[in-house]
Image (spheres, rainbow, N blue to C red):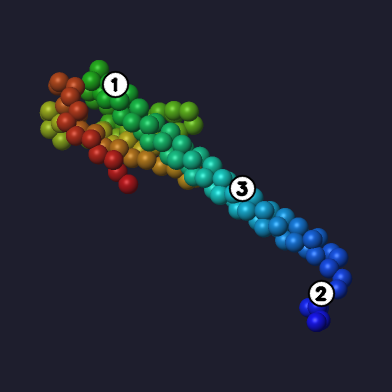
Amino acid sequence: MSKPHAIINERGSSLIVSLLYTHIILLLLLHAVSLLSTMHEIAHNDLERSKVYYAAEAGLYMAGEQLLKQSKCTAFHFDMNGNAVEVKVTQRQPTEVILTATAARPPDYAAGIVMTLNPVTGDITNWEDTK
């Protein structure tokens, strides 16, 4: 009986297999680093948008407080940690004042909020986020 033919010269096959496995592991690691980098960028953008939004909100509260002290102002400007906040005041009725706040951190981030305030009682009667 004859024996099946064995592969002659198998030397170097383990090198090819180990290089293949190393390549696959390297690709997986590069993909993980890319994914983590993207997640970090998303988290950073979310943080910056939140800072701008809360700067607009703080500007509304500060303008509302100053408006209750002196009722003849039509606009306020604030700088809150690098966020330019502008609040416009519109009197609709003696018991209704609309404050519109816009905050921006150029070039990418902006937020807007509209608040309706009763200047007699100091109550906030309406609150809307603008896009």
Q: Which disc, if any, is residue 66?
A: 1
Q: Secondary structure at mark 1?
A: helix
Which residue sits at x=12%, y=28%?
Answer: 95
Compare marks 1 and 2 and give the one earlier in the sequence. 2
Instruction: Answer whether residue 70 is visible to the viewer in this image.
Output: no
> Along the line of sight, which residue is nearer the eye, 64 or 29?
29
Q: Secondary structure at mark 3?
A: helix
The amino acid type of the residue labelled 2 equals Ala
Q: Farthest residue toward the left?
A: 94
In the rendered image, which residue does mark 3 sit on?
33
Note whether 26 is above or below 119 in the view shown: below
Q: Farthest residue toward the top?
A: 69
Q: Which disc, if any, is residue 6?
A: 2
The amino acid type of the residue labelled 3 equals Val
As drawn, is 14 to the left or to the right of 129? Answer: right
As drawn, is 50 to the left or to the right of 8? Answer: left
Crowding at mark 1 (Cα within 10 Å: few <14, some 14-19, many 20+): some
The amino acid type of the residue labelled 1 equals Gln
As drawn, is 110 to the left or to the right of 66? Answer: right
Horizontal and vertical percent for residue 67?
Answer: 25, 23
> Along the line of sight, which residue is nearer the eye, 15 or 124?
15
Horizontal and vertical percent for residue 45?
Answer: 48, 42
Q: Which quarter of the picture shows residue 89?
A: top left
Compare marks 2 and 3 and give the one earlier in the sequence. 2
Which residue sits at x=30%, y=43%?
Answer: 130
Q: Farthest residue toward the front?
A: 1
Which residue sits at x=52%, y=45%?
Answer: 39
Crowding at mark 3 (Cα within 10 Å: few <14, some 14-19, many 20+): few
